[in-house]
Image (spheres, helix red, strand yellow):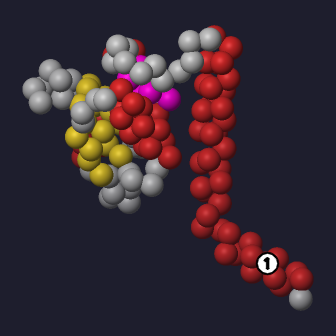
Amino acid sequence: MSMAEEVVLLDFWPSPFGMRVRIALAEKGVKYERKEENLRNKSCLLLQMNPVHKKIPVLIHKGKPICESLIVVQYIEEVWNGTNPLLPSDPYQRAQTIFWADYVDVKVPFFVSLLPVIPLLFCVLYMLLL
């Protein structure tokens, strides 16, 4: 793959946001190099490519970073527009699809942030029921 065509995805395997990008790339048939990130010890490449949020996923295309999964999917759709449309052609259906994708973006991080405190919540609930 030449530098002009190089596509790299900075990702973390269980991330639903990274999965969204991986699915879009697969649907479009885009070949890419996937680099697994350690979110507790972020790579210099991730910090350089996403200095604002320092989060995955980051798509690097022709040496330029695209951040935030919905923006990355939109970019993939625009750059590789010759095959397999990712969104419906009907404007209403497309708006509904984007609405639900945004809903997941807003709600999933909230529930993921609760994971560390769930055992504590169960202990408190148990104590209250005794």
Of residue 61 and residue 76, the one placed in the foreground of this image is 76
Q: Which image quadrant: the N terminus?
A: top left
Residue 75: say if magenta: yes
- Name the image quarter holding residue 29: top left
Q: Position of residue 93 (x, y in %)?
A: 66, 18
Residue at 43%, 43% in the rendered image: 18
In the current view of this chain or complex, which residue is farthest to the left? 2
Q: Residue at x 12, y 26 (%)?
A: 3
Kind of residue indicated by mark 1: Val
Q: Quadrant of residue 50?
A: top left
* In the foreground, 54 or 86: 86
**Image height of 25 relative to 19, above or below:** above
Q: Secondary structure at mark 1?
A: helix
Which residues are drawn in magenta? 70-77
Taking the image as shown, residue 124 lies to the left or right of residue 65, namely: right
Q: Is residue 50 visible?
A: no
The residue beneath circle 1 is 124
When the figure is inspected, residue 43 is found, relative to residue 57, above or below; the finding is below
Q: Quadrant of the C terminus?
A: bottom right
Specify few, some or many for label 1: CA neighbours under 10 Å numbering under 14, 14-19, or 20 or more.
Answer: few
Asked whether, in this view, residue 106 is left or right of residue 65, the answer is right
